[in-house]
Amino acid sequence: MKRCVPLEPAAENVCNQSSIPPLIFQLPPKQGRMVLEKAQDAPVYKYPADVCETKVETTWGQIPIYFVTPKTCDPIQNVIFYIHGAGWVFGSFHTHEKLVRELAARTNSLVVFPEYTRSPEAKYPIAIEQCYFVLSHIWEITSGQYANCKLNTKCTNRNTLTVAGDSVGGNMAIAMCLMAKMRCGPQIQKLLLYYPVTNACFDTPSYCQFATNYYLYREGMQWFWNQYTTNPADRNQITASPLCADTECLKNFPETMIINGQADVLRSEGEAFGEKLRCAGVDVTALRIQGTIHDFVMLNSLDQTSACRIAMDASTEWINRNRQCTNNK
């Protein structure tokens, strides 16, 4: 079909395949999860890493946590807390494994990856509370997991904590920063957001321009939000719609990078959030990647596109820049 925005061939292919009924959001959640899991079985290069799993009992229920460490002889001095996207409903470690392995390898970091309880089984704010519990105990959890491993306990890795996420994972990553600020939680040095959800509003310019046939549908995002919460009061909370936060709430946010795709219904709200952070005095790096769609850093089939490669080059270089490492007091 003729598109108003020309896409890279692989992204075009994904759009065409995802437009065949029934669309993923028209399926029951369990069936839709299987569709994405199967799609992510597609062969892809995965950076070498050690992966192990444990379970953590949060005050909001037990969840699995994955730890990804790169195959390196160097001591690991940095931690990335990564929250996965896929509409609060779908997504898992499997769907995001190639992405977090690359982040771990190219930044020499331990990636901590919680598998929060998904919607509609869990409604707002269960997922963010589960994630925040892990984040607020991250140093105890990582010390216990890696007491005899490569994590460099002589380095104050509290100074190199990056919180990151894609899509609704980006939404929840922002919530982690807000909750840490409100609850005097751990110090977060950097915030990395790939095409984040920032507002329960569906009439932005990008929502209108890319409402259908660009992989993530406007109707699909409305469905995802309905699975997460239909309550207007919940949706207006800044930990659900952080674009509603005033600049005072966003002051002293960590240095932030936001990467959006050109042909994505979420692009306008992602860029608007970056502008709001900048108005609050936050150091923001924002990129719009041309010729691509939503989920372009997550989907295995888009891994070797120019869009994914430049996004991963930019984000890993940005994480590595200006890292702090001081001795424990």
Image (tube, rainbow, N blue to C red):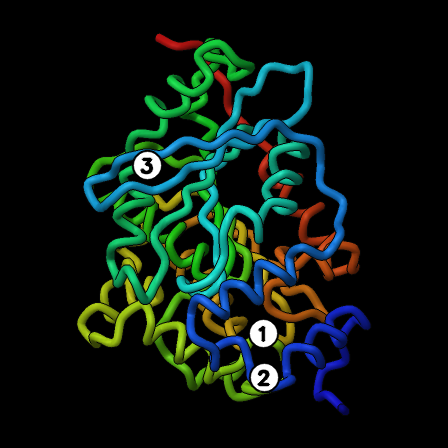
- Residue tagged by mark 1? 264
At 68% from the left and 20% from the top, the residue drawn is 72
Query: Residue 279 appears in which quarter of the rendering?
Result: bottom left
Kind of element beneath mark 3: helix
Decide which of tag 1 and tag 3 comes sooner along the chain. 3
**Front-lying residue, 49 or 246:** 49
Q: CA distance from mark 1 to mark 3?
A: 30 Å
Q: Residue at x 62, y 56 (%)?
A: 298
Give the CA distance from mark 1 to mark 2: 6 Å
Looking at the image, is 255 positioned above or below residue 105? below
| Image height of 193 relative to 8, above or below | above
Q: CA separation, marks 2 and 3? A: 36 Å
Local SS, label 2: loop
**Looking at the image, which residue is at 20% across and 75% down?**
231
Instruction: Report crowding for label 2: few under 14, some 14 to 19, many 20 or more residues within 10 A (C-alpha).
Output: many
Quadrant in the rendering for residue 54: top left
Check the image and report above or below for 232 versus 274: below
Query: Which residue has dot 2 on it?
Result: 210
Is 253 or 26 nearer to us in this picture?
26
Q: Earlier in the sequence, mark 1 or mark 2?
A: 2
Image location (x, y in percent) of residue 84:
48, 52
Residue beneath label 3, please? 134
